[in-house]
């Protein structure tokens, strides 16, 4: 896994990702406290709405930006979006109205909607070898886990000496450091006139033509690319399962810790850290597990763990709190983080193996948008239910949503798809108006 860091370009990009995500994790914790200060007992509803605004920006803007990402220098786009995010974050400590939080979150996530898919589409170009790319995906999952693990631990330490508002300054510093690292890195520019690749399974109608479409047409074609392949439709159902369980963690944790269990503020980042610890542990174990079992088996089975963990939370909340409640919550968040990581980490392999290489920016942007549409549903649902009916009702309803996603993925992803478990392109074949992989699969090696 660590061998990919020998590539100097990827090493600098990975460092940029780490510092930016560490800062983002500080902002996640600080935003919870800001919502609590502004709304008190309604903090879950405010936080859920703020996160829904974030998801709306991702859903609407990511496909458009993905269609434009191959028209501008990649490095300039990434640096500009990092600096824009830093400027917006610095304004958050000065808000005193809930609506101001929503406006700034919208601006912040608009920049992230431009940054993240462009960054994701750059990595396969920097690391064209599948073994290296698989290792990079595992490292990327670990980097994302810093937002849930290292950042909350750092936040807990900082909160002992500074007010939570200073956490936003740490976030801005992370974005600025990321911009400096990207600015000093040579990145591959988009090919202005890419040659056609052998058609993989998700482009049966020739959506990815060599002629460059307009921004709107490019955005639509990216979404069609994702929806055309059975594997990618199943991936969207898996995203729904992860979003349902993750929304309970990210929206309801502050209420569960502060109000339900009556614990101090410093335990909020510790609970979020348990979620990140499970995710990181799974990311470390996944490479060998994926080599043995394949993507479909690992991802679908892990998806069914998610409603199990959230369902146990709902049952536990029906009982009076006791000395067991705090360790039980940490254990459930640990399991939920591990299962979510097992679903999300191989997703890039599945996308990469389902579209032409020149269509990667549009496909990653479309998948980014559609997956966040799932969070757009679950974030406000978790916040509204927690505020009106209580955390137990929130967990119960989202258990049903997670179960629906896992069940849908199991039905959508064909068991007979030989390339489905390996993230490899294969020749296309028609089946009931959609595409299906029919070529031989090649196993991936452990990164």
Image (spheres, grey):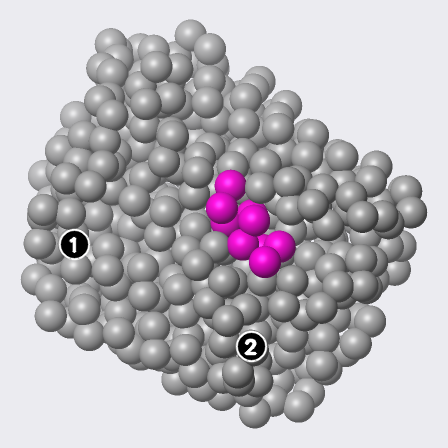
* Most foreground residue, 41 or 49: 41
Which of these two is toward me, 32 or 53? 32
* Quadrant in the rendering for residue 116: bottom left
- Is label 1 in a helix, a strand or a loop? helix
Q: Earlier in the sequence, mark 1 or mark 2?
A: 1
Magenta segment: does it hold 274? yes
Q: Residues within 10 Å of mark 2 (few under 14, many from 20)?
A: some
Q: Is residue 28 visible?
A: yes
Residue 145: image location, x then y, percent: 43, 51
Residue drawn at (53%, 83%), measured in percent from left and top?
161
Q: CA distance from mark 1 to mark 2?
A: 31 Å
- Quadrant location, the C terminus: top left
Q: Position of residue 2 (x, y in %)?
A: 20, 41
x, y (%) of residue 226? Answer: 41, 37
> Label 2, on which residue?
159
Residue 294 in the figure: left or right of residue 310:
left
- Residue drawn where x is 69% and y is 45% of the image: 327
- Magenta-tinted stretch: 270-278
Kind of element beneath mark 2: loop
Residue holding disc 1: 11
Residue 350 visible at all: no
Q: Residue furthest front?
A: 323
Residue appearing at x 91%, y 47% in the figure: 320
Magenta: main secondary structure = helix
């Amino acid at each position: 896994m660590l061998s990919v860091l020998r590539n100097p370009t990827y090493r600098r990009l990975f460092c940029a990702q780490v510092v930016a995500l560490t800062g983002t994790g500080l902002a996640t914790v600080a935003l919870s406290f800001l919502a609590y200060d502004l709304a008190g007992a309604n903090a879950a509803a405010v936080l859920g709405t703020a996160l829904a605004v974030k998801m709306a920006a991702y859903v609407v803007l990511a496909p458009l930006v993905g269609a434009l990402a191959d028209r501008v220098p990649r490095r300039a786009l990434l640096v500009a979006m990092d600096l824009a995010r830093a400027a917006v974050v610095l304004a958050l400590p000065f808000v005193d109205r809930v609506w101001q939080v929503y406006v700034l979150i919208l601006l912040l996530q608009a920049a992230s909607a431009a940054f993240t898919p462009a960054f994701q589409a750059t990595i396969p170009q920097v690391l064209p070898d599948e073994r290296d790319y698989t290792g990079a995906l595992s490292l990327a999952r670990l980097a994302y886990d810093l937002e849930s693990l290292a950042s909350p631990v750092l936040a807990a330490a900082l909160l002992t000496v500074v007010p939570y508002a200073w956490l936003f300054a740490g976030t801005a510093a992370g974005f600025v450091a990321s911009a400096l690292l990207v600015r000093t890195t040579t990145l591959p520019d988009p090919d202005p006139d890419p040659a056609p690749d052998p058609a993989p399974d998700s482009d049966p109608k020739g959506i990815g033509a060599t002629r460059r479409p307009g921004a709107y047409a490019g955005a639509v074609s990216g979404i069609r690319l994702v929806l055309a392949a059975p594997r990618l439709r199943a991936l969207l159902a898996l995203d729904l399962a992860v979003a349902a369980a993750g929304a309970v963690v990210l929206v309801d944790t502050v209420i569960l810790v502060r109000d339900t269990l009556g614990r101090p503020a410093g335990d909020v980042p510790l609970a979020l850290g348990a979620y990140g610890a499970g995710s990181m542990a799974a990311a470390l174990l996944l490479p060998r597990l994926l080599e043995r079992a394949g993507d479909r088996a690992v991802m679908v089975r892990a998806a069914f763990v998610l409603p199990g963990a959230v369902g146990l939370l709902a049952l536990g909340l029906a009982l009076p709190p006791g000395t067991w409640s705090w360790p039980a919550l940490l254990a459930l968040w640990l399991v939920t983080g591990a299962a979510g990581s097992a679903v999300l980490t191989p997703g890039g392999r599945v996308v990469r193996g389902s579209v032409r290489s020149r269509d990667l920016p549009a496909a990653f942007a479309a998948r980014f948008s559609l997956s966040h549409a799932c969070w757009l549903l679950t974030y406000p649902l978790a916040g509204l239910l927690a505020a009106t009916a209580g955390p137990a009702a929130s967990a119960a309803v989202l258990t049903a949503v997670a179960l629906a996603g896992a069940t849908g993925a199991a039905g959508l992803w064909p068991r007979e798809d030989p390339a489905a478990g390996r993230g490899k392109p294969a020749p296309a074949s028609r089946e009931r108006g959609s595409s299906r992989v029919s070529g031989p699969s090649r196993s991936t090696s452990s990164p």
